Image: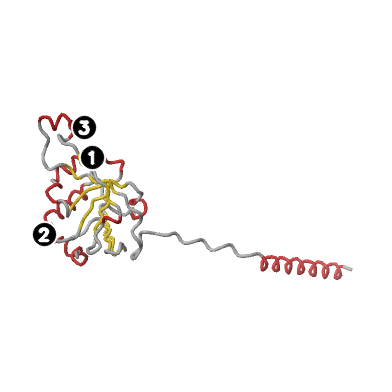
Amino acid sequence: MRNTLLTSIFVLAAGVAAAQSKAIAQTPAPPAKEEKNTYQLTGAPLPPLKLVTFDTLAKKLTGRELKKANKKNRQRWGYEPVTNIITEQDLSAKHNTFLMIFNPNCGHCEDQTEYLEKNIDQLKDTRVILVGNKLVVQYMGDFIKNLKLNDYSPTLSIAIDSADYINQTFLYSALPQINIYSPEHKLLKVFSGGAMMDSLAAYVK
């Protein structure tokens, strides 16, 4: 009788195991996770772009002009910033574009900007736009003033990200980060922590 009981237990266990296997086989596999559309990979398209520029007046305001200028800007910089909007449609259809993610309080970012200014002749028709987070907007004026960015416009310009460009493209590795886009708005190269002209030269066209 003991042998019969053991045999029954084994048969029952085998039946349960078979039923479980059948159930697992019939259960549909979970759908594969849809790959995120990342803008960080080489060849990725430029994400929707909306940059508010800080193309400031080249001259300092005086007299009546200064009185009419925005009080906060007048007290801080002595001039009134002139802002414009840059979207992907405004980028060159013939030349590459460099978008440099930076922070005006970052020493490496300042060094890279000064380096680009010193090598401005080598940038030819390439447009370089420094893109900062809107949280640092209060420091932009001093950055523009100290580095005399007005002297290098329109090759070099500075702007605030207003369409989440930074969050979608920043690798969170090092600042500054230079993203280089083709005339077709495809990502060609990313330089984290800045780059020298011998590295940038291949993309200056």
- Which amino acid, by three-letter code, is at mark 3? Asn
Q: Quadrant of residue 98?
A: bottom left
Please determine whether, in this image, residue 27 is positioned above or below residue 160: below
**Image quadrant containing the C terminus:** bottom left
| Residue type for callout 2 | Asp
Q: Amino acid at mark 1?
A: Tyr
Name the mark nearer the viewer: 3 or 1: 3
Q: Foreground residue, 3 or 128?
A: 128
Q: Which residue is mark 2?
A: 121
Q: Residues within 10 Å of mark 3 (few under 14, many from 20)?
A: few
**Residue that badge 1 annotates:** 139
Residue closer to the observer: 13 or 126: 126
- Give the mark, 3 or 2, whose residue is nearer the N terminus: 3
- Which residue appears at 16% of the width and 36% of the height? 79
Tell which circle, 3 or 1, labels the residue nearer the N-terminal end: 3
Residue placed at 17% from the left, 42% from the top?
A: 56
> Residue 93, relative to residue 150: is it above or below?
below
Secondary element at tag 3: loop
